[in-house]
Amino acid sequence: MDKVRFGLSNTHIALFDKSNYGNFLTPVKINGAVSLTLQPVYSNFKVGLLSGINKTISTNLTGYTGSVEFATLPYYIAQNVLNYSIDSNGVYTEKSNISYNSFAILFQVLGDKTNRRYILFDTMITSSGKMEYETIGEKVSIKSHGFDIEVRPFNDGINSQWSYKIKSFVDSDNAVIYNNWFNQVYVG
């Protein structure tokens, strides 16, 4: 096991295959990923007891919320996830009445002993991101382009299993899957 994890790398986006439910298009590498944060979201089922005290019977994971940041807005995300229109002059336009596309995000986190690879299945950008710029003074301050995201349950359509994320690290049992992690979305 790793003692330290560092370094977000190998970030890929795979859009849902709209013609084949439960499948994804080929992942596309997205350069410039700076950070990714996730917080689990739970739903508690409580019952009231005769004593007037509520008791939590079960806690269900209902997804994740968080954010992803890139050094700049990747063109692939602008065009294919945020659905910006692009005119014949190559000018990107963000429309007000467009919905965003869901996608899987694949990435790797480096560790001191292993490099773990993850897939977040049904990811949705919930805001188009903040824009922040400054004039250059005596020192340069680098700004990134961030998005709020939500990871929802995904049903693979095969095993009727609902999943949010999976992870893998290389060992003798899964070297083929690990080595092909970014070639297609592994759904189990």
Image (tube, rainbow, N blue to C red):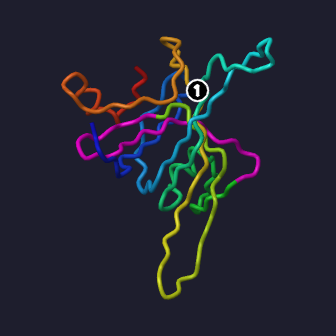
Quadrant including the C terminus: top left
Q: Dot 1, how many residues are within 10 Å of its Cα: few (below 14), some (14-19), or many (20+)?
A: some
Highlighted magenta segment, given as a residue range:
95-119
For image coordinates 56% across by 56% down, the residue present is 146
Q: Which residue occupies the extreme front position in the image?
A: 51
Above or below 135: residue 180: above
Above or below 107: residue 175: above
Answer with left or right where residue 77 lies relative to residue 32: right
Answer with left or right where residue 34 lies relative to residue 181: right
Answer with left or right where residue 48 lies relative to residue 103: right
Q: Quadrant of residue 119?
A: top left
For image coordinates 63% across by 51% down, the residue present is 84
Q: Quadrant of residue 108?
A: top left
Residue type for callout 1: Leu
For image coordinates 63% across by 64% down, the residue present is 131
Question: Mark 1: which secondary structure?
Answer: strand
For image coordinates 62% across by 30% down, the residue present is 42
Residue indicated by mark 1: 61
Q: Quadrant of residue 54?
A: top right
